[in-house]
Image: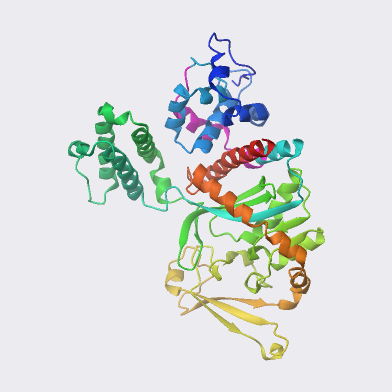
Amino acid sequence: MIKKQTSLALSPYMGIYDLIIPKDNLLRQMNELVDFNFIYDELVNVYCQNNGRGAIDPVRMFKYLLLKSIFDISDVDVVERSKYDMSFKYFLDMTPEEEVIDPSSLTKFRKLRLKDTNLLDLLIQKTVGIALEKGIIKSKAIIVDSTHTQARYNQKSPREHLIECSKRLRKAVYAIDDKMKEQFPAKVNNGLLEDELAYCQKLITVIENAEHISGYPAVREKLNMLKEVVEDDHEQLALMSKDADAKMGHKTADTAFFGYKTHLAMTEERIITAAVVTSGEKHDGKQLQALVEKSEQAGIEVTDIIGDAAYSEKDNIVYTKENNINLVSKLSKTVTHQQSNRINPNIFEFNKDCQMYVCQAGHMSFKKTSTRPKKHAKDGTGTVESYLFDVEKCKICPYKAGCYKDGAKTKTYSVTIKHHTHEEQAIFQDSEYFKEKSKERYKIEAKNSELKHRHGYGVASASGIFGMQLQAATTIFAVNLKRIITLMG
């Protein structure tokens, strides 16, 4: 049964908050800026209204998730810190002497209460509404780009993930007392996951029993992280070996990542107005229309779109022209490929960084050839570019039906380049207005860096597309609030 917590419980110690939490504290400013009661309206249908034991206040549970994103810490650590950090208690609407929740409650809240909510759009629209209300957003341009996030599990095998976490823990211990090495259990190198799990559990026991070591915050955080991974493994081993939603993406011809992409739209004031989470292989340009529509739903009037060459494909040029929007994106012939008469043209995605095509299995072409029909030799149009794929990978590909014919010695994907359809855009990109607006694009690169390096967005905190969307929702909500507070100051 849901119950609202509209005010702090009476306590003789409430005055301590005013004494020790300064006015410019980030969490105090967030509490004063946002009315978090909108969480009740969003989750009203997932709680029983008149039966059962009283549930933990959903606003408080949401704030716990928000603290995890702001400070990039585990479930255990965010609960542990809320025991003694008065700014955490204040933000969570707790009395100074109040007991904290059990960390397992956060897992249940994510899985049972949030699974059917569109939290990503809701939280972004909430922050954009606050920014508009405060008069912070004045521009009518959005800057678009994507940032990649590595999958939590599949980038390494389950055993490799455990080895890395235990290594970090040992290093933290050695920095304090290198003699602890004599008490640690013998490492296992037989390649068995079960034995690695047993080793990690023994390591945890040894460090927990050494209270003069486990009390250090640097050790405690690494210890809690390893414990969380070990406990999750008993439930998540199957997911760790196959995260069905994550896919292989490519940053350059030589570097790749396994995970997800978050496609972002942001105002020139650096407020994120829309986000779309996809698997890692998806093409940036295909998400432009969704980003514009989500930004407009959030209350932004869009007259200009600023992005790199990935957004200058033909469909986007036509879409922006129909909606009287200036597309400040340089033309690149390789992303204006015309895929006519294709049954399913989205099976192959063009990667602007590698200048190659990637199939739906995540395999990238390794070679490109160009030909031009004789009738177009003079006007330069009609160039056909063919991209070659490794047939050895195609032979064992789970998607080969309808794509690769058994016995074929080569696999190619061909597209036709038509330059004349982009003449107006070519003229526009030579204008002074285009050049001036292009200078704003660097801002979204800085925002991507902030998401990854300050809020842990470089690696997914859970498996599956829903887990990634939830991580995006809380992280972007926190980042937008921080930006609004900065601009207001």
Magenta stretch in the rendered image: 99-123
Q: Is residue 52 visible?
A: no
Residue 7 locus on image (x, y percent): 63, 17
Which residue extends farthest top? Answer: 12
The residue lying toward the viewer, choosing from 69 and 487, is 487
Q: Is residue 101 magenta?
A: yes
Decide: is 339 above or below 92: below
On screen, 230 above or below 439? above
Residue 335 place in picture, x, y as percent: 64, 69
Left or right, 1 with reference to 169: right
Residue 377: image x %, image y %?
69, 89
Residue 325 position within the rendered picture, expressed as x and y whole percent measured from the top left: 79, 58
Residue occupying image coordinates x 57% and y 51%: 448
Q: Quadrant of residue 429?
A: bottom right
Q: Nearer the viewer, residue 240 or 297?
A: 297
Is 478 rendered above or below residue 436?
above
Q: Is residue 60 magenta?
A: no
Q: Quadrant of the C terminus?
A: top right
Does residue 244 appear left or right of residue 419 in this picture? left
The image shows a total of numbered marks equal to 0
The quadrant in which residue 328 appears is: bottom right
Q: Main secondary structure of the magenta part?
A: helix
In percent of the image, x 47 and y 58: which residue is there?
A: 257
The N terminus, quarter of image: top right
Left or right: 178, with 154 as reference point: left
